[in-house]
Amino acid sequence: MTDATVSTSRPRAILPALEKIYLPLDTFAETLLRVLCGVLLVTHGYGKIVNPFGAVGMVESLGFYPGVFWSPLLAATEFFGGILIAIGLFTRPAAFAATIVLLVTVYFHGIVQGEGLGGAEKSILWAAILFFFAIRGANSQSVDAKLGKQF
């Protein structure tokens, strides 16, 4: 195998009997992570979508001017992006946009509010999960798959 060749096979399990559990649940586990991520993003963005200009001061305090543009964009990214991620439609661009939002929250909590890693760790985890879906896209259990196309 050369460096240019990518292996798609998985390493064999140390306990081969467990593969009977792992393999059938593979797609389910990924789908569950995507749907939960999307639903939780929707619930987090709900307050912002109800009051899309409520975060104007906060986004401007981070240097995002004008806040009347960025605050509704933040609300839409979290709320509608969460819906798209949950159903698996335009998964990559929705997850990419949400990743950017979460990286800003890493900066906000870790640096601006001086909370360090302890304050930013949840945002770091969220950003990593969203980055996974920005790169991976949705799986076979998604609207993207049903359409037969994805970004």
Image (cartoon, helix red, strand yellow):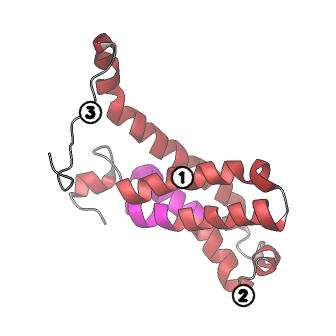
The residue where tag 2 is placed is 65
Q: Which amino acid does label 2 sit on?
A: Tyr
How far apart, in angstroms, are the residues tagged by discs 2 and 3? 47 Å
Amino acid carrying mark 3 in the image: Arg
Please name the residue shown 83% across and 56% down the image. Answer: 115
Residue at left 37%, top 33%? 28
113 or 61: nearer the eye? Answer: 113
Q: Which of marks 3 and 1 is in front?
A: 3
Give percent across and percent down for residue 40: 60, 48
Residue 109 sits above or below residue 2 on the image: below
What type of secondary structure mainly makes up the magenta span?
A: helix
Callout 1 secondary element: helix
The earlier-in-sequence mark between 2 and 3 is: 3
Q: Residues within 10 Å of mark 1 (few under 14, many from 20)?
A: some
- Find disc 3 in the rendering and name its residue: 10
Give how far across and how far down residue 122 sits, in percent. 68, 48
Write down the quadrant of residue 99 in the picture: bottom right
Q: Which of marks 1 and 2 is nearer the N terminus?
A: 2
28 and 134: which is toward the camera: 134
Above or below, comparing residue 93 to residue 84 in the picture: below
Q: Is residue 80 magenta?
A: yes
**What's the magenta region?**
78-96
Q: Which residue matches tag 1?
A: 128
Asked which quadrant contains residue 103, the reply is bottom right
